[in-house]
Image (tube, coloured by chain):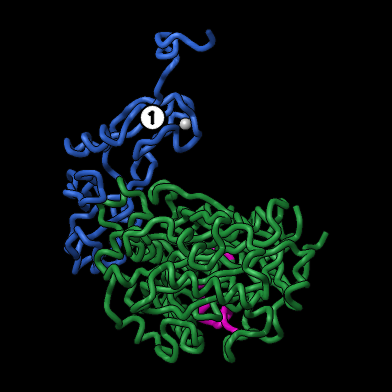
């Protein structure tokens, strides 16, 4: 009879993800920005993915980023999608470790002007979106505040 | 690979479809293209379709197979393509490949959408699904939000005063609405044709700094093209338009792209298309690009190589993207002036370039002399899918 014994077959099976989205979200809930450090190029990956975002290497370990960085750009959403209440400020932050992350900025939307771009920011926690019938449950993103 | 030609075009009026379903809109565009090509519809061997949200709009998946049935094309295959707002352009690229490879001689590429039926909050929610749900979803990011962020970054990258950046962006809206108002198929036909910078800046704020007039509308509509092997094209038409080159690129989560004014997916896709066609931006005489938002047009022009980094803004304000300028862009009105039924847009852009090459574009929008080479650029999601087609009035240079 051809084929492989179930026990042998099961032993051959392996999964490779070092940090799942659920782990990342759990970290945010605790106020931590989790990511990966690459043992090949020593650079950082955040949010998590299968391989190093810089060199594509697979030798990764879980790490915590400082949650500090520069506000690269932002917008004030006045017309939101169903399930969100405007106004609010999504932003892109370049972390001190290198990766850019998407988050929300805790700031008065009516006072948010272009000169915010370039300011130092730090993570003050997470914004938790309860989610909707499409999102597969609640989702979190970093919540930033000005550090200067 | 064989040479491939477009021999038939169909394009419904864009705007609100009060009565016709996605399937019926698709049927209209398909019938226009079949009659324009003068083929026997039984000669169509396969259909390639874009349709982004039919499940959310009408509770319908696989709309294309029902169109096939309604048109009497069954049982030839129909496949729906995924690429968010670039779905139809992806469909046209694969349709090209099936003919170029010799598998089929005559096929149809098409697309349909009925987004207005969803209403703005629900439509904004479904459109945002084209972004990365798990990192961009909780931030409440929307597509106008993404291009608002891109506008701020653009101003900062190139040290262009923010107010001046917004003025230059307004010129994109002014130009595209001017030409949309002249296009009988556009959502804003005979409307908004004489905007000023103040009109654009003072319209309702959507996502700071993008106002309503910086944004394309939600739209309903459909488009279709008939594609065949170049060696039989002249059996059907005296004005075949050849598909000389194409490219496609994939992006990723927005944060991982980092500088979103230079998305690698678009640069890669455009270069692939130019390489395949053996042409450069200097050869292109009509360009239909994905102006979902005013800032998007500037970014697209630079990524494709029509202007250096940071120069598309002033070039636009100077009229370099108008008729008589360096590269007439979106002379059908673009997404901003003509409308953006997402599942149809890519094929609708190709239809507009073919019209230009036949000399059949509406007065005021037709480039004179008739362009020899044209190009389309379509974006799906926030740089998730990029597709380019280069078209010409003569076959590929060997
Ligand atoms: Zn690495």
Residue A11, placed above or below residue A59: above
Instruction: Specify the principal SS of the magenta part.
Output: loop
Label 1: few (<14), some (14–19) or many (≥20) C-alpha neighbours in 10 Å: many
Give residue A61's quadrant in the image: top left
Residue tagged by mark 1?
A37
- Relative placement, left or right, of B102 versus A99 is right
Residue at (75% x, 69% y) in the render: B233
Q: Position of residue B210 (x, y in %)?
A: 34, 72
Question: Which chain gets the blue colouring?
Answer: A
Q: Nearer the viewer, residue B44 or A104?
A: B44
Give residue B84's quadrant in the image: bottom left
Q: Nearer the viewer, residue B339 or B37?
A: B37
As for residue B67 lying within the magenta part, the answer is no
- Relative placement, left or right, of B27 versus B235 is left
Count every numbered label the image shows and give the total. 1
Classify mark 1: helix, strand or loop: strand
Q: Which span of residues is magenta-colored?
A: B308-323
Give residue A23's quadrant in the image: top left
- Relative placement, left or right, of B225 versus B165 is right
As for residue B322 lying within the magenta part, the answer is yes
Q: Is residue B310 visible?
A: no
Q: Position of residue B247 (x, y in %)?
A: 61, 55
Q: Position of residue B142 (x, y in %)?
A: 31, 61
Q: Is residue B345 visible?
A: yes
Q: Colour of chain B?
A: green
């Amino acid at each position: 009879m051809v084929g492989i014994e179930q026990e042998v077959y099961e032993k051959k099976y392996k999964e490779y993800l070092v940090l799942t989205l659920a782990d990342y979200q759990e970290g945010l809930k605790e106020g931590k920005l989790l990511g990966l450090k690459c043992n090949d190029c020593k650079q950082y990956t955040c949010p998590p993915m299968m391989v190093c975002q810089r060199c594509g290497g697979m030798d990764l370990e879980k790490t915590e980023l400082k949650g500090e960085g520069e506000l690269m750009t932002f917008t004030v959403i006045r017309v939101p999608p169903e399930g969100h209440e405007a106004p609010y400020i999504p932003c892109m932050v370049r972390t001190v470790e290198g990766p850019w992350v998407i988050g929300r900025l805790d700031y008065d939307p009516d006072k948010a002007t272009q000169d915010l771009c370039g300011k130092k920011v730090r993570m003050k926690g997470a914004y938790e979106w309860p989610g909707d019938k499409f999102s597969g449950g609640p989702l979190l993103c970093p919540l930033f505040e000005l550090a200067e | 690979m064989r040479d491939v030609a477009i021999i038939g075009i169909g394009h419904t009026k864009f705007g609100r479809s009060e009565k016709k379903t996605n399937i019926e809109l698709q049927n209209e565009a398909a019938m226009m293209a079949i009659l324009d090509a003068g083929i026997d519809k039984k000669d169509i061997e396969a259909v390639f379709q874009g349709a982004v949200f039919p499940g959310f709009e009408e509770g319908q998946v696989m709309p294309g197979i029902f169109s096939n049935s309604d048109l009497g094309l069954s049982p030839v295959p129909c496949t729906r393509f995924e690429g968010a707002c670039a779905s139809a352009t992806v469909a046209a690229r694969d349709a090209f490949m099936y003919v170029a490879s010799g598998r089929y001689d005559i096929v149809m590429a098409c697309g349909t959408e009925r987004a207005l039926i969803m209403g703005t909050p629900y439509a904004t929610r479904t459109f945002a699904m084209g972004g990365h749900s798990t990192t961009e979803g909780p931030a409440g990011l929307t597509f106008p939000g993404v291009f608002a962020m891109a506008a701020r970054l653009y101003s900062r990258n190139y040290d262009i005063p923010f107010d001046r950046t917004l003025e230059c962006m307004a010129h994109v809206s002014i130009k595209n609405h001017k030409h949309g108002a002249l296009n009988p198929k556009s959502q804003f036909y005979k409307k908004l044709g004489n905007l000023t910078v103040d009109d654009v800046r003072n319209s309702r704020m959507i996502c700071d700094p993008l106002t309503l007039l910086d944004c394309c509308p939600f739209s309903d509509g459909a488009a279709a093209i008939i594609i065949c092997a170049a060696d039989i094209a002249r059996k059907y038409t005296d004005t075949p338009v050849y598909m000389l080159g194409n490219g496609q690129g994939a992006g990723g989560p927005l944060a991982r792209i980092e500088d979103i004014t230079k998305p690698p997916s678009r640069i890669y896709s455009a270069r692939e298309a130019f390489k395949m066609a053996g042409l450069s931006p200097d050869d292109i005489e009509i360009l239909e690009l994905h102006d979902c938002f005013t800032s998007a047009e500037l970014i697209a022009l630079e990524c494709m190589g029509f202007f250096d980094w940071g120069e598309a803004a002033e070039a636009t304000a100077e009229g370099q993207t108008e008729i008589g300028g360096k590269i007439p862009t979106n002379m059908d009105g673009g997404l901003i002036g003509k409308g953006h039924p997402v599942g149809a847009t890519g094929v609708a852009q190709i239809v507009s370039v073919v019209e230009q090459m036949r000399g059949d574009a509406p007065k005021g929008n037709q480039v004179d002399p008739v362009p020899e080479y044209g190009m389309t650029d379509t974006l799906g999601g926030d740089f998730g899918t990029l597709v380019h087609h280069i078209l010409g009035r003569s076959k590929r240079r060997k």
